Amino acid sequence: MQVRAIETIYNGYRFRSRLEARWAVFFDALSVPFEYEKEGFVLNDETRYLPDFWLPTLKMWFEVKGELTLVEQELPEDSGLFLRQHEKLYSCPELDLMRRFRSSQPWPVALSAGQPGDHRIWFFGWDMSYSSAGEYEDNNAFWCIANGKPTLNVNIMSPGREIYSDCLYGDVLKHFTDARDHGYTLGPIDNALRLARGARFEHGETPMM
């Protein structure tokens, strides 16, 4: 039996799922502008992809999934003695798509898996502090308020590192380092997550909180 996502109308958009609509509630609670399914892409490998959200003030794409898909992989013959026989390797099609998307257009992309407040965020961007075209990934990014504005804390620990818009010396996106440089707070984030998680849409476009 297949479970189908419920289309939901909110804030003038018809979202493909309640999960997407709840993240829209989250963005509205923090006054983060968003555009839903703004533009489709054909990636470098000819894959067609339509991102969920474009966040113009953060200059970042934001994809949401209820859960990720894990595909078991065979251990390579040259895996070495440090891999026990009972250990398994997995690939994740959704994370692989985000890496390819990041490399096919100028802007960073984040993928959130799970319901608001019970989710995990992967971030894919560019860091050229140490090289001319360095890929940057963080598997545990989180929303925060830094320097007075909502952003992602992407765990940039070294003061010499910055997130760039692309691999060809694009703009430095300093808001991603604000949490490191200015500190951060989580109170407004926690409140927005509660609103998003508790939103009910059965009674029309304005969710019941």
Image (cartoon, rainbow, N blue to C red):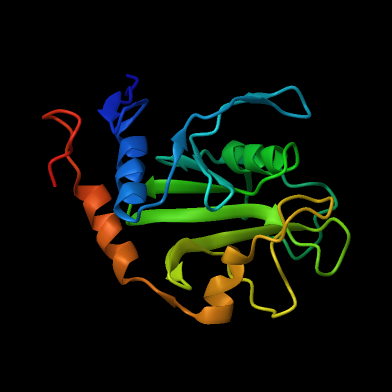
Residue 127: quarter of image: bottom right
Residue at image position (78%, 63%) is 81
The image position of residue 112, as x and y in percent, is 47, 48
The image position of residue 21, as x and y in percent, is 32, 36
The image position of residue 192, as x and y in percent, is 29, 57
Residue 144 sits above or below residue 112 on the image: below
Residue 144 left/right relative to 166: left
Residue at image position (29%, 56%) is 193
Residue 68 sits above or below residue 127 on the image: above
Residue 205 sits above or below residue 122 on the image: above
How many numbered marks are there? 0
Residue at image position (31%, 28%) is 12
Residue 174 sits above or below residue 9 on the image: below
Residue closest to the eye, 45 or 3: 45
The image position of residue 27, as x and y in percent, is 37, 49
Residue at image position (56%, 72%) is 178
Residue closest to the eye, 29 or 18: 29
- Image quarter in which the N terminus is found: top left
Residue 169 left/right relative to 37: right
Residue 118 left/right relative to 72: left
Residue closest to the eye, 197 or 159: 159
Extreme top residue here? Answer: 1
Asked if residue 168 can be seen in this view, the reply is yes
Asked if residue 86 can be seen in this view, the reply is no
